[in-house]
Amino acid sequence: HAPEDLSDLLQNVKFQSSNFENILTWESGPEGTPDTVYSIEYKTYGESDWVAKKGCQRITRKFCNLTVETGNFTELYYARVTAVSAGGWTATKMTDRFSALQHTTLKPPDVTCIPKVRSIQMIVHPTPTPIRAGDGHRLTLEEIFQDLSYRLELQVNHTYQMRLEGKQREYEFFGLTPDTEFLGTITVFVTTWFKESAPYVCRVKTLPDRTWT
Amino acid sequence: QFGPCQVKGVLPQKLWEAFWAVKDTMQAQDNITSVRLLRQEVLQNVSAAESCYLVHTLLEFYLKTVFKNYHDRTVEVRTLKSFSTLANNFVLIVSQLQPSQENEMFAIRDSAHRRFLLFRRAFKQLDMEAALTKALGEVDVLLTWMQKFYKF
């Protein structure tokens, strides 16, 4: 029998973006069956033509990576999915207007936590994105967001927490007790775009103090 | 900091929150996906000196044409509230901008004006309803561009 309306075959067509990796996802509706096939097109807002995404034509999976095709973060994009059921019914649904700058979320940073006797050093590594600059190098989050900063917190005990914040990459918490375990959490945040990552967490133990006393 | 022009007391977060509250509604009503009013030719590679003139004319257009006509046409309270917040902040910005009228700035002023005409021509090519909806749905494009000139 015929699907009542579009959402019987196809639902929730949207972009999911994290560190500028832009994945189109969707769900099949109640009428969707495992052999329903999906074809994806995308376009830049302001242009007329839809472009078929190679590699995402008549697929049965429910996601498609459009990172490259939506890689200019000064542009806005649309994508649409056409579902064709085994019975030949079709349904097409479009995403909302997509802006990677506005929609992308930030992944936890990559950090190296280095314990010493009375301090813990933390080195935040730059976060490459799939976006390429004019000269072909992959832009980092730090290059895209001029005001990107890091917030580092060290839980010393139940009541006391040390905090450092800044744009540089190397930090060190001093004045710690040797041979003691500490919990560090590091987040990335971008004020102008109201973005904050989930924390990177490291549990480290300061080294024993082997100096003669 | 739009080149020589400085603006104080405007919090970008307030503008974004106001827009995001109505973004999906406005952009969903705009089904002309093949037309973008604030195209790259309007906003790309704008020099700091030119930015003061361009932001002034764009915001004035939004106040005198877009918000005004939209206000006359809609009764949807939530939308009106959001666009009032945006409009009030645009008034605050425009009132502080003092684009220089000196002769040697003529070429820069003229370049900004030609960019604005690109935008307005595209706006006028649509019927008023569609043009208003599209212009309001593109406030994020405008805010994104303005944010480049934001100094901490």
Image (tube, grey):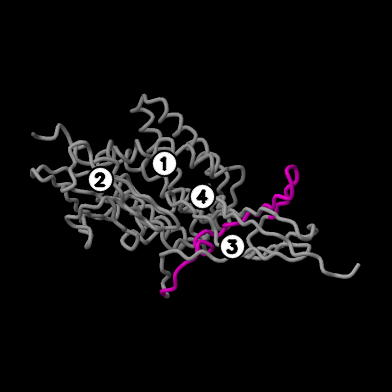
Q: Amino acid at mark 3?
A: Val
Task: Please name which of the two marks, 4 or 3, marks the residue nearer to the observer.
Answer: 3
The local crowd at label 1, few if under 14, some if 14 to 19, many if 20 or more residues have their Cα within 10 Å, is some
Tell me, yes or no, whether dots 2 and 3 are on the same chain.
yes
Query: Image check: B2 left or right of A78?
Result: right
Residue tagged 2: A94
Tell me, yes or no, whether dots 2 and 1 are on the same chain.
no
Q: Residue at x 28, y 55 (%)?
A: A64
Splitting the image into 4 quarters, where does residue A33 fall?
Answer: top left
Task: Please name which of the two marks, 4 or 1, marks the residue nearer to the observer.
Answer: 4
Residue A147 magenta-highlighted: yes
| Label disc, if present, on residue A210 of the rendered structure | none
* Percent coordinates x, y for residue B53 in the rendering: 48, 53
Query: Between A187 and A194, which is closer to the camera in this rendering?
Result: A187
Chain letter behind tag 3: A
Residue tagged 1: B62
SS label for mark 3: strand
* Percent coordinates x, y for residue A207 in the rendering: 74, 64
Between the C-alphas of marks 1 and 3, the distance is 45 Å
Query: Between B79 and A22, which is closer to the camera in this rendering?
Result: A22
Reply above or below: B121 against B62: below
Q: Amino acid at mark 1?
A: Tyr
Chain letter behind tag 1: B
Tell me, yes or no, whether dots 1 and 3 are on the same chain.
no
| Residue stretch in magenta | A136-164
Look at the image and tell me in which quarter the N terminus of chain B lies. Answer: bottom right
Give the mark, 4 or 3, whose residue is nearer the N terminus. Answer: 3
Q: Amino acid at mark 4?
A: Trp
